[in-house]
Image (tube, coloured by chain):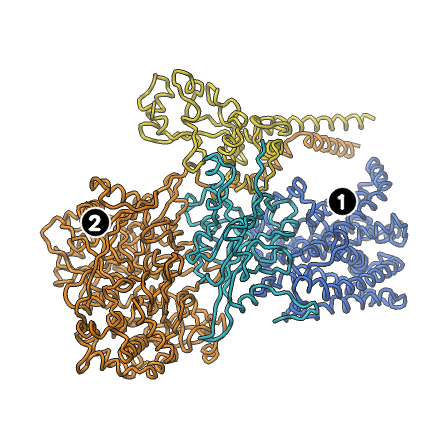
Chain colours: A orange, B cyan, C yellow, D blue
Amino acid sequence: MGFSVKRRDFLGLIGGGAIGAALSPAPWKSLDDVAIWTQNWSWKPRLPRGPVEVAFTHCGLCPAGCGLKVRSVGGSPVSVHGVPGHPLSAGFVCALGLAGRYLSYHPSRIVEPTVVGTDGQRRGIPFKAAVRQLGKWLDEARSGGGHGSVAILDNRPDRMRSLAYRKWLGALDGVHVKGLREDAPINRLRAMLDGQVPELGLDIARARTVLSFGAPVLEGLGSGEAGSRLRGRSGTEKPYIVQIETRPSRTAHSADLWLRIAPGTETVLALGLANILVSEGLYDKEIIGRTALDLDGPGGYRELVARFSPKQVARITGIDAATIKKVARRFASGPAVVIPGVDPGGGPLSPEAQTAAFSLSLLNGDVGRPGGVVARRVSETIQLPGTAQLANTVELADVPDGSIRLLIADGIAGGCAMPTSLLKRKLNPSEGRVVSLSPFERSAMHEADLVLPSTTPFESIDETGVPIDSPVDSMGLTVPSMRAPDYSVDSLHVLSMVTKSNVPKITELLRSRSDRIHAGGRGSVFDPSKGESAPITEFKTAGHLWRALLDGGLWTDSSATFTCPPFRLMGADAAIRDRLHKVLEQPSTADGWAHELVLMPFGWRDAPGDGPLPPVMAKLFRETRLRLDSRFATICPGTAKDLGFAEGDKASIKTSLGSITVEVVLDPAVANGVVHVAVGPSTGAFGDATREKGDQPLDLPSCKNDDCWRVIPAKMLEVVS
Amino acid sequence: MTKTTTQKRYGMVIDIDRCDGCGACMVACSLENNVSVVPPEAGLHRGLTWIRVYSITNEKEYPHSDTAYLPVSCQHCGNETPCVGVCPQSAVDVDPKNGIVSQIPERCMGCRYCMVACPYHARYFNWWDPVWPEGTEHLLNPGVTPRMRGVVEKCNFCHGRHHAAQERAASEGRSEIEPNEYQTACAEACPNGAITFGDLADKDSEVAKLAAGPESFQLLKTLGTGPKVYYLTQRSWVRDMAAKTPLPLDGQSND
Amino acid sequence: MTRRRTTILFFIIGLVVAMLAGWIAVPAALYESIEQPLGFSHVVHTSDDTGMVCDDCHHLTSEGGFAGIPKIAVCEGCHAEAIGTSKDELRLVEEYVKPGREIPWLVYARQPDNAFFPHVRHTRLAKIPCEQCHGDHGKTETLRPLKRNRFTGYSRDIWGHDFSGITTSPPNSMKMSDCVDCHRKRGVRDSCLACHK
Amino acid sequence: MIEPLTNRAPTRVFLTWIGFWIALFAIGGYFGMLCLSQGLHHTNMNNRFGFGIWIFLDLTVIALGAGAFFSAFLLYILKKQALKDVIGSAVVLGFICYSGAVVVLAIDVGQPLRAWFTFWHPNAHSMLAEVTFCLTLYLLVLAIEYVPLILKNPSLSKNVSLLVFEGQLHKVVVVFAGVGAILSFFHQGSLGGLYGVMNGRPFAFREHFFIWPSTFFLFILSAIAAGPSFLILINKLASKISKKQLVRKEAYDFLGRISGWLLLAYVGLKSADTIVWINHTAPGSGYSVAEFFKEASFGTWILFAEIVLFGLLPALVLINDRLRKRPLLMIVAPLLVCIGIAINRYVMTLQSQSLPTLPFEEFVLYTPSLVEIGVFGGMISYGVIVFSLSYRYLPLYPGLRQKAKT
């Protein structure tokens, strides 16, 4: 009996319970709550709450220095926009600028000072210890070597901060070394001019023709304002863009004329164009005859270019004679700008190529005329406290090999990547040390002996510098839009601690420049909140101007006139002149190393070769393959067939220095016998720039002969997995 | 009490010949809409790209080689919208006032039927929990809620910006927004001005004029889904490839 | 026949226990009660001798958004030094005003991230009084503790204090269905995205 | 304690058999938990393949499970007594197929905890909503039809009141058969409708009759054609394993004949539909069928296999009284039928997604991940377990039961 009764009663209890529960809201409410829980469970990110504050600043990620409108909630920037009407950026912001604020939280951010110990292992040390270590090395360097044994590598050498560096170095008999920048070649042009020459700017926007030797003119080179004109978006007449580049770059894609030049033959093409200008007399004989110091006579320019007949040039460069003639005539038909481009990953052209290119500007009478090369007024230099002379500023190329014993790298990104080997060469082989003041582990710097974490451009106040194309001087500030983390340090602060000398604070420096500008009483100031400019005279006190700059304002100088002084079409440097004359001699394959194709590294203008990539950009390029990073190599189907490769194959690219492993990608637009590999951040993870040694194409090239690594002899081998 | 609102038809015109494939639109879009940074193993087909730039080439060698870039987002179909009818729990709808096709992640149960039904492959599924680098949550756009794992998401013409514009207008006592008050992030970010966004119903708007122009075409017009995203090009090979030209009824393939 | 009766008895026991649990135990267990960080009286602040009105603290931002609960700076306007000697008054000055810390107020009407509620559209365009949704919160002497759903984190004001949640509407509940009802009444036809972000 | 019916396998044998399947089930369960707790990235589905093998196999399983409602319909409504033998197994099979499919679906969707929204905020136009409603309701019906079987267990049936209860159920079983038939009719159809309505997917889109695309009717027809064949297979399999004659020849013969004729009708309509699709529907939306089959992995051979090899052929066998007498053919033909249906569901589900609609999108192939296979393996083993238990403890086969009594 008991059994079945129990069972029945139990069933009764269950039944009653079920009905009772169903008659109460509990089960239905929990069903609802469960659904709501899935909509806001704890691991779904919470949105920032609170009112939105709007502020204006400038972007410090590259020298273009675009104006930014920053919307913040609770002190963190939640969105970034362009500033319409901005004199330099004209409302433009590149993808990097939009996403740049995320860099502050990049996985490769350095969060404590690290030093490489005797065992070769990198370990964290306290800030004080790091400074002591730096001080020790400084003393060693100075006792060990003479002039230039201490150097600061500065990617934006025209800032007030740089001035403080030079003062500091002056006391130590050191040198201020310019990092690689897109405007570096201009100094080549200045060297071709005779006598005292002011700062020069390329007036791209007003040119009739832009002759770009591989410069990313349509990918954000220079100011956004010029960019919008080059893209024909400003209503003004759009310059005719001739892109001379081997790689099917984005600029090549949208240029009016793309000349796919044979690798490394830019010098020949430039001289070929000169040949036509000279032979057809497409230049102002009267003026040039007067100002050109080396046009005629034995070994003169005329004699040089005579050897570069269109037929000859066509054979070497792979561009047919008719096109060369057409380009030359177009070029001569009005103000033109020649840009010997510095590729963010491929680096600069050879010195002789740069010279040959600029000789066209001089021949065309573009130096000193609007739409050509114009001069900037330089607001007179500010006197800094201290008796020491300012150390002079030199290009890295001009630094004697092995001379530097202590190299301090300023953290700011220059936008261009450099081969580790190039840097190494300049260091003293036995005790050359590198100290990096950087927010991130940078590709070229990832072997620094000592690293001090500095701030990102969004966290610290600084100057943006003047864009390559700006015809006038300007001052815009990167006003912090996020708090600098406690572990980050300011370079000037570090320097003052090391030498116990008083190095002025960055704000003091900037303020003093602002005051000097106010005293000068020249130019006008743009107010981003109003979107209009006012003459500087409207600012009663220096304080008003400073306030305006801190509110994201931009000061622009009035333009100066400048008449071209006498010049040398082949430059003052005998060595370069000599090379120009030897161009046509068959170039020996580097180190006599037999190769079957050439490796041409390149970089993306708005994904700097020397910095990390915001995770969101890395993600998108990864998921769409719109941009390929250093894990991919692009070759044309023909070459692939000859070498026995197919799309997606794994291949190893070997140069005389080492090899990298890549995945093969086919593109019919790529030239025969050429392989393109991107330099810089890998999109593989969150956009990390630190890579294993020998994994970056830039760890491969040797820079023994000159400072050019655009064209590297290479082999492509199958990877046996 | 109810206001009579003017009927809008928001749409977009994308000039393929102006696009150089820089990807700024994608970046701006992802930032504006808090699109998750998906784990790297996502590969080409498991990511989240509300607007995706395709690159197509004419497969010719230099100097005849040519590449075109096509940014493709949700086409906001105006006719028999394929994704709306299929959703079992009304997580997708078309705004009667402005024709924007919505996708409500909190309502979606992640059956992915709408993805299968969409001919433009413009819908994306959250295969992972959303990820951002540590500490970046407070950099997110407060106007758009992040999606959770297991739901579908897609372009909604930056509706967060539409909200913001409405709020601003309301604070000035207006119930309607001015055309210049509402722009999508991609249109704003494009350095080449290749993307034009606006109200197609307003005949004087630039977008309407461009869409009516001779060079404009729609993707997969023959499906009759009436996309509100138009494309422009002067290059015939691009048009032949991108626009699915109607086939003769004898069923001959045209490729 | 005793069998049958015992069974029925058991049935009723089950029924009653389950219903008690569903109507009383579950609601009690589901919500946790959290005290506000400070005492606050709307009545005192809006009384004639202060001469303050709602907008003085709860205003709109430049972009039209609702600023919500005022920041500590607003309090500092009057409370830079302690007014009176009440315990809360002193805590306000010492713990929040002086160090410039924000008061971690708990919001009764906090909607989830995916809800977009433009206050300005409702108050300025539709002319809906705050009280219609927030009730007479502005006339309260003290701040009641926040009842928070342990599971979803929602304030109980959203679901409403009637646990069955069937009949309620603002100000007694602020569910989506309540918004929808009001919109229907006013003939506002909208898509999901009109109120969801 | 519930003890097995007489003349069942010794406990040790049974335990080893069931143990194996439980292990398999556990693996599937683990994989399922992975997907539920971490997300569907454990599968190989992607944005181009929103539906994977899970949906394909669910559809197949549901089609094969149609035997349940159809035989119930034939037996209780049309009074085809020949089916008395198989009705028990049919109900159990149906229950297994449907409950299994529902569980896998719960893992397949990204947010199962919200699946009930479909009932609370349904979209009346959505075929999937229709499927969900009918599927869940019919599962309920199957459960109710299953209960009397359970109650027939000897040790349970000792309990008088439960027996009474069971008797009551039996009286209304006719009603349930009717309801079940209608529900199944609709969800089988709307499963086909899923694809036919996709106006954005020319490969799947079909002509409409009233509000229903042709696939709606084709799926119903193919399902009721395949159901009986599946019944034949399973019962023959069960007989093989248990080495007992469980079902009388007449039942098999009847099922075979039904299956055959229905399949023949299906093949006819399917062919007609395909011709219309090739010449009118697809070109109408700007695609030529040639494009659909230009990829090697999905050639026209698949069309031939589906309609002729696994359709017409077995149909002709099954409608032929002489051939139906041949035991081997009575296994091969039903097998072909089931495979044919599987192919059809495969084509509609996976091939339709593999083909890009955007001309510049690539053709994508997808291979299921171990997790996906594992989960489905778990479902199969769940089926085997339930069927074995039912076979061991419940009188699935009235014929057998009488034998046992004597």
Number of residues whose C-alpha sits closer than 10 Å to that of mark 1, classed few (under 14), some (14–19) or many (20 or more): some
**D112 relative to A347, above or below:** above
Number of residues whose C-alpha sits closer than 10 Å to that of mark 2, classed few (under 14), some (14–19) or many (20 or more): some
Q: Quadrant of the C terminus of chain B?
A: bottom right
Q: Where is residue D201 drawn, in percent x and y?
A: 65, 59
Query: Which marked residue is nearer to the observer: mark 2 or mark 1?
Result: 2
Q: Where is residue A20 drawn, in percent x and y?
A: 70, 29
Q: Name the chain letter of the residue that bears numbered label 1.
A: D
For the question of whether residue A488 can be seen, the reply is: yes
Cβ atoms at labels 2 and 1 below 8 Å apart: no
Q: Quadrant of residue C163?
A: top right
- Name the residue furthest left: A387
Number of numbered callouts drawn = 2
Type of residue at label 1? Ala
For the question of whether residue D108 can be seen, the reply is: no
Q: Quadrant of the N terminus of chain B?
A: top right
**A7 relative to A431, above or below:** above
Q: Which residue in the protein does label 1 denote?
A: D143
Q: Name the chain letter of the residue that bears numbered label 2.
A: A
Q: Which residue in the protein does label 2 denote?
A: A522
Type of residue at label 2? Arg
